Image (spheres, rainbow, N blue to C red):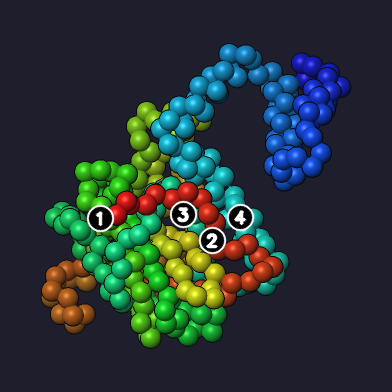
């Protein structure tokens, strides 16, 4: 039951729209804003939203911006996941299959990480209590052939669940690297098994999650951008198998195909793999598809953190 006549809602929407000048401004923005206002005003009426609630929301939005938490809110409300759903559906419609599934980027990427060829060690700062991890695989095209010249950017958090740059106590680019693959398409990195992530306590996202009766935690995961000339940028993650939150991720990023088996190699078998200590081993190939014009591009131009030289 609306607390106001539909006629008045529509009149107000019309009034607001009537100030737009033809030929001025941006048509796409006009369409989007008018649609969102339409849905918002109707929701305000349907839900009997009070002045108190409206201004609480304004305060929360203001604080979220001050905290730089909108990227986190997009993740936690499933907005970023829903964009993936739409792009996946579009891929299916145009017949794109057999690719490594995409999943959300999240708000914690930093551009410009140190580059190397075929192999990288992610720890700028050693994590002495970490369980050693080696992850490796091949970047492949639609036919399974390696893609020479592909680049694998990788980033993950430390054992406190914090990401370098956003956590200023870590060295710049700690646990962030860019690996250029050679002719064989292979990449490998040495790191440690990361832990899960939790939203900053009492921040805007955490506050919202609590009001929704939800948690603000992610299972342990590792992020990737995989790029190659002519191919669609792949934004994805893998999960650490066995994490209790694997399918209870506040950011909805887990996909069954992105939970590779993690194998534990004891110290005595390590030399067989050319390693000198016990380690956890993940094998994971990235299957790329060519850039196409009839489905969403792999890249978007959201503002990303960079490090001043
Ligand atoms: C993360 O580490 C992350 O990957 C996402 C999507 C949201 C918050 C923290
Ligand atoms: Fe993350």
Q: Determine the CA span between mark 3 and mark 1.
A: 18 Å
Secondary structure under tag 1 reads loop
**Mark sitting earlier along the chain (3/4):** 4
Select label 3 or label 1 by which is in front: 1
Q: Residue at x 25, y 43 (%)?
A: 168
Are the residues tagged 2 and 3 within 8 Å (C-beta)? no
Mark 3: is the Cβ under 8 angstroms from ligand 1?
A: yes
Total tally of numbered discs in the picture: 4
Viewer-side label of 2, 3:
2
Q: Is residue 51 left or right of residue 128?
A: right
Separation of residues labelled 1 and 4 (CA atoms): 31 Å
Closest to the observer, 186 or 17: 17
For label 2, the SS is: loop
Q: Is 33 on the left-hand or right-hand side of 305?
A: right
What is the quadrant of the C terminus in the image? bottom left
Residue 174: mark in rendering: 1
- The Cα–Cα distance between marks 2 and 4, rounded to whole angstroms, is 16 Å
Q: Are marks 1 and 4 in contact (CB under 8 Å)?
A: no
Q: Residue at x 51, y 66 (%)?
A: 233
Residue tagged 4: 85
């Amino acid at each position: 039951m609306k607390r106001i006549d539909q006629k008045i809602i529509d009149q107000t929407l019309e009034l607001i729209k009537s100030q737009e000048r033809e030929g001025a401004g941006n048509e796409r923005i006009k369409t989007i804003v008018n649609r969102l206002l339409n849905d918002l005003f109707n929701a305000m009426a349907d839900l009997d939203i009070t002045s108190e609630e409206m201004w609480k929301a304004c305060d929360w939005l203001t604080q979220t911006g001050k905290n730089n938490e909108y990227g986190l809110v997009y993740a936690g409300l499933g907005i970023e996941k829903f964009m993936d759903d739409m792009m996946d559906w579009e891929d299916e419609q145009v017949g794109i299959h057999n690719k490594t599934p995409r999943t959300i980027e999240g708000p914690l990427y930093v551009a410009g990480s140190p580059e190397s060829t075929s192999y990288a060690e992610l720890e700028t700062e050693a994590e002495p209590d970490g369980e050693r991890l080696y992850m490796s695989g091949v970047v492949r095209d639609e036919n399974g052939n390696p893609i020479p010249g592909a680049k694998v950017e990788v980033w993950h958090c430390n054992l406190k669940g914090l990401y370098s740059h956003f956590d200023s106590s870590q060295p710049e680019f700690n646990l962030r690297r860019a690996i250029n693959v050679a002719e064989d398409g292979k990449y490998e990195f040495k790191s440690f098994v990361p832990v899960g992530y939790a939203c900053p306590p009492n921040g805007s996202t955490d506050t919202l999650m609590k009001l929704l009766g939800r948690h603000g935690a992610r299972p342990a995961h590792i992020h990737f951008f995989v790029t190659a000339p002519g191919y669609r940028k792949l934004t994805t993650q893998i999960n650490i198998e066995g994490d209790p939150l694997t399918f209870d991720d506040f950011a909805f990023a887990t996909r069954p195909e992105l939970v590779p088996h993690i194998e534990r190699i004891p110290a005595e078998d390590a030399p067989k793999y050319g390693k000198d200590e016990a380690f956890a081993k993940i094998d994971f190939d990235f299957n790329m598809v060519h850039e196409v014009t009839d489905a969403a591009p792999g890249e978007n131009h959201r503002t990303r953190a960079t490090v001043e030289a």
